[in-house]
Image: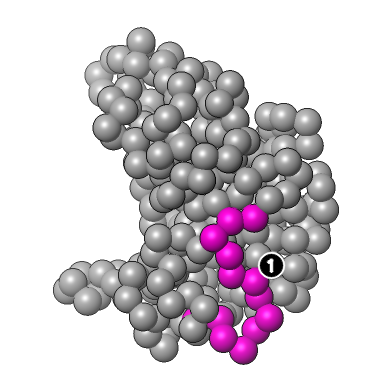
């Protein structure tokens, strides 16, 4: 299964994006472009594949859902510093790719210092939040208090283990239905995810932390498609 409708007109997908029927509109969070270069600055060298991976998956999303608008929900870039030439080039390449097929809105995340410099020369809107289809869209590092809200920032994941400790880790969508909070998984291939725990101090995003997140519905991204995993409390009761 490629997608699940969690609310009327709101679909979570195995493509790590949320799709609203309004438009349609695609919402993606946490690309973290330039991650490899940041590691190089720390003396660790890995192939520079994140941007290529993002481009390939974005092409698939644009073809599959044919959106009229794409909302990038923050942390488009990885480093907090002013963008280096290569990072700025990657950011602009992603923006231009999307603009060939749809409108694009950039919601500023906590990593997106100087994001306006990276996309100078385009007419792309950069904003701290936007409202659409009755939802506040914001990155999630700061909670506006508006509900319902769709955020990123958390990079949510869960671990599924058997009795001998063998298992897998899955990025997840989180839907705290009663509190009106939806959290997207990170789009970056390099994000292993922040394992959701019962301990509230382990939650990064304030909107999720303030919610009854232990009773939130989880939807896992897997090679078999998107899977309804039940509630977070079920994982801890089984542990």
Quadrant assignment for the N terminus: top right
Residue 188, how many percent across, how many down? 46, 57
Residue 14 in the magenta stretch? The answer is no
Quadrant assignment for the C terminus: top left
Q: Nearer the viewer, residue 5 or 225?
A: 5
Relative to 191, 19 lies left or right:
right
Quadrant in the picture for residue 149 = top right
> Residue at (75%, 76%) from the top-left corner?
100
Residue 184, how many percent across, how many down? 53, 44
Query: Which stretch is magenta?
Result: 118-130
Q: Residue furthest top?
A: 237
Q: Is residue 54 visible?
A: yes
Residue 223, how many percent across, how many down? 54, 40
Residue 82, how many percent across, how many down? 36, 80
- Dot 1 crowding, Cα within 10 Å, few <14, some 14–19, many 20+: many
Quadrant in the picture for residue 21 = top right
Q: Which residue is mark 1?
A: 104
């Amino acid at each position: 299964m490629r997608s699940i409708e969690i609310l009327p007109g709101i679909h979570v997908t195995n493509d790590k994006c949320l799709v609203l029927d309004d438009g349609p509109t695609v919402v993606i969070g946490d690309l973290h472009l330039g991650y490899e270069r940041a590691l190089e600055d720390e003396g660790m060298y890995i192939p520079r594949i994140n941007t290529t991976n993002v481009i390939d998956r974005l092409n698939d999303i644009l073809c599959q859902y044919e959106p009229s608008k794409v909302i990038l929900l923050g942390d488009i870039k990885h480093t907090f510093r002013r963008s280096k030439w290569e990072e700025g080039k990657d950011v602009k390449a992603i923006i231009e790719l999307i603009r060939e097929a749809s409108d694009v809105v950039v919601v500023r995340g906590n990593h997106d210092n100087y994001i306006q410099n990276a996309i100078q020369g385009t007419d792309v809107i950069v904003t701290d939040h936007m409202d659409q289809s009755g939802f506040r869209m914001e990155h999630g590092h700061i909670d506006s208090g508006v509900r319902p809200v769709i955020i990123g920032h958390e990079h949510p994941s869960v671990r599924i283990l058997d009795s001998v400790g063998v298992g897998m880790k899955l990025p997840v969508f989180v839907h705290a239905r009663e509190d009106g909070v939806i959290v997207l998984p990170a789009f970056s291939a390099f994000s292993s995810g922040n394992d959701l725990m019962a301990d509230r101090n382990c939650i990064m995003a304030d909107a999720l932390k303030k919610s009854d997140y232990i009773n939130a519905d989880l939807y896992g991204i897997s090679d078999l498609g998107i899977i309804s995993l039940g509630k977070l409390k079920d994982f801890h009761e089984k542990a």
